[in-house]
Image: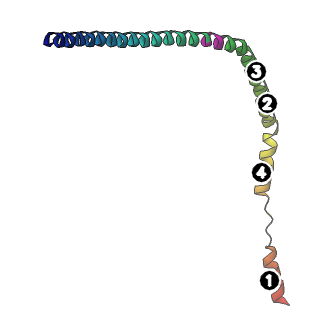
Amino acid sequence: MAAQHSQGIQTLLEAEKEAAKIVQQARQYRLQRLKDARTEASREIEEYRQAKDVEFKSFEASHAGVTSNAQAAVDKETESKLQAITDAYEANKDAVVKKLLDRVLLVKPELHRNLRKVGGAESQ
């Protein structure tokens, strides 16, 4: 009976070792699958990123002409407005300076209206 008991224990130990090996293999398999999944996901992300970059560059190139044309039109309009302002300045600067000097130099001394009222009331 002791031999059978010892034989049963030995069989259980071997089964336990075999189970431990199977569990270890399953863990390794699972880790390898996770690594493979991460690698595959990284590759797909990179492919998607490259596709979107190409799409964006295509979109940008197709709309770049519109932007440069608009910029050229705005620059031309700005230049014409600046030229008009400069022309108006050159045409009117002498007249404006003359008007300013006339106003500054033409002084008519008179009493302030409030002072006149006070002065007029005292004489009554």
Q: Residues within 10 Å of mark 4 (few under 14, many from 20)?
A: few
Q: How far apart in space, not on screen, are marks 4 and 3 (Cα)?
A: 42 Å
Residue 100, disc: 4
Magenta-highlighted residues: 52-57
Camera-near label (4 vs 3) is: 3
In percent of width and height, residue 18 lies at 28, 9
Residue occupied by mark 1:
118
Helix, strand or loop for disc 4: helix
| Extreme residue in the right direction | 124
Query: Looking at the image, which residue is at 64% across and 14% down?
Result: 56
Q: In the depicted view, which residue is nearer to us: 97 or 105?
A: 97
Query: Do callouts 2 and 4 mark residues in contact (Cβ within 8 Å)?
Result: no
Query: Looking at the image, which residue is at 83% across and 87% down?
Result: 121
Q: How far apart in space, not on screen, are marks 3 and 2 (Cα)?
A: 17 Å
Looking at the image, tell me whether mark 1 or mark 4 is earlier in sequence order.
4
Rendered image quadrant of residue 111: bottom right
Is residue 53 part of the magenta span, yes or no? yes
Give, as a three-letter code, the residue at label 4: Leu
Q: Main structural element of the magenta stretch: helix, strand or loop?
A: helix
Q: How far apart in space, not on screen, are marks 1 and 4 (Cα)?
A: 33 Å
Q: In the depicted view, which residue is nearer to us: 99 or 75?
A: 75
Residue occupied by mark 3:
70
In this picture, residue 93 sits left or right of residue 7: right
Q: In the depicted view, which residue is nearer to us: 16 or 56?
A: 16
